[in-house]
Amino acid sequence: MPELPEVEVVRAGLAPAVTGARVLAVEVMDPRALKRHTPVGEEPGLGGHGRTLSAETGRGRAGDFERRLTGRTLTAPLRRGKFLWIPLAPDTARPGVPEGAGGPGEHGGPGDPDTALLAHLGMSGQMLLRATDAADDRHVRIRTWIEHPEHGELRLDFSDQRLFGSLALDTLTPTAPAGSIPAQAAHIARDPLDEYFDDAGFVTAIRSRGVGAKKLLLDQRIVSGVGNIYADETLWRARVHPDTPGAAISPRGAVALLHHLREVFDQALAEGGTSFDEQYVNVNGQAGYFAHSLNAYGRGGEACPRCGTAIKRVPFGGRSSHYCPRCQRRKSS
DNA sequence: CTGAGTACCTGGCAGC
DNA sequence: TGCTGCCAGGTACTCA
């Protein structure tokens, strides 16, 4: 599944192709891929999470998304944790009235101010750059035609088998001490590769909680970008049992945990991310190589590369944890 | 506030 | 062979 390194590979791959490109056309083939999109004038979340999108709501969303994105110019893509977004350049070409019979009160000002095209890949989402005449990939949900001043016309296809991911147009809100972020991603912490990440805050947050270390690593409000794979890998490197309560981790231990997390992310990034089946690929549809470097995740029953003991696989909240029972002893508070 | 439970999806695969 | 049913995974919702 795409975690921080995979999303960063996608961001970096998109950058040269989309920065400065103009959106020629948008086609929403499956409105369920707009789960996170809120049409202008609608309350966030209405008809969204926890409910199946009605056909009518879906069409409304698709129309709103297509109208507001078409004609806009994309700027350099940004990322925090697993959220990826492309801020739209100020809309100078659209002074007010939208085309067609747009809803009442829509597009009152100079287009959408401070808006970004937001993407979350969920479990199986992909952003694919294709030639305009390339064959269809499987599970393409939203197709965008763009024109880049140097690279010409391209297709940007959002493909997603399981539909846990989505695209959206969202409002950018400022963040301290610098930058901005889409409103619906504003609640997550910065990620460990962010220059403004609060190391001391991380140590405090970890040590003030009673829940297990793995749960803390997966809590996007404490540190963003970590999913099941990199949580297990980080804990293996740090020799911390997944159920060790945060409060039982020493200050040095928490610092070390963060260090190992960064190390894992850096290495995965250098190897192009982790690919198992067809679940994750870069913008050209190619797999990453980090799966070969995994020490614990997905290796239940195999020998721990450090001590030879069989890696344990245990249920963890509907999924699995992998750890070495010898290297990673459980501590209690 | 925190934790537990659950909906959202599809395709792959085990089991019959 | 063909069917059923289970499961993965991240997020954000509701409820206690």
Image (cartoon, coloured by chain):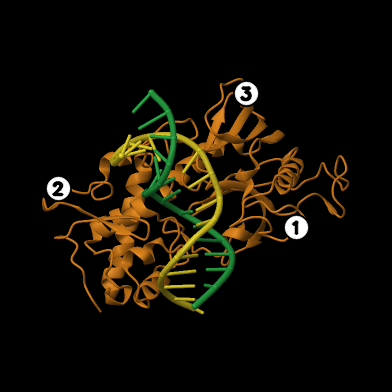
Chain colours: A orange, B yellow, C green
Q: Quadrant of the C terminus of chain A?
A: bottom left
Q: Amino acid at mark 2?
A: Ala
Q: Are marks 1 and 3 in contact (CB under 8 Å)?
A: no
- Left or right: A332 in relation to A80: left
Residue for badge 3? A132
Give the Cα separation between the discs numbered 3 and 2: 47 Å
Rendered location of residue A237, percent (x, y): 24, 56
Q: Residue at x 32, y 69 (%)?
A: A212
Residue for badge 1? A42
Q: Residue at x 23, y 48 (%)?
A: A295
Rendered location of residue A140, percent (x, y): 57, 33
Rendered location of residue A71, percent (x, y): 75, 37
Q: Amino acid at mark 3?
A: Thr
Chain letter of mark 2 equals: A
Give the Cα separation between the discs numbered 1 and 2: 54 Å
Q: Quadrant of the N terminus of chain A?
A: top left
- Left or right: A115 in relation to A293: right
- Left or right: A269 in relation to A168: left
The answer to whether residue A325 is visible is yes
Give the Cα separation between the discs numbered 1 and 3: 33 Å
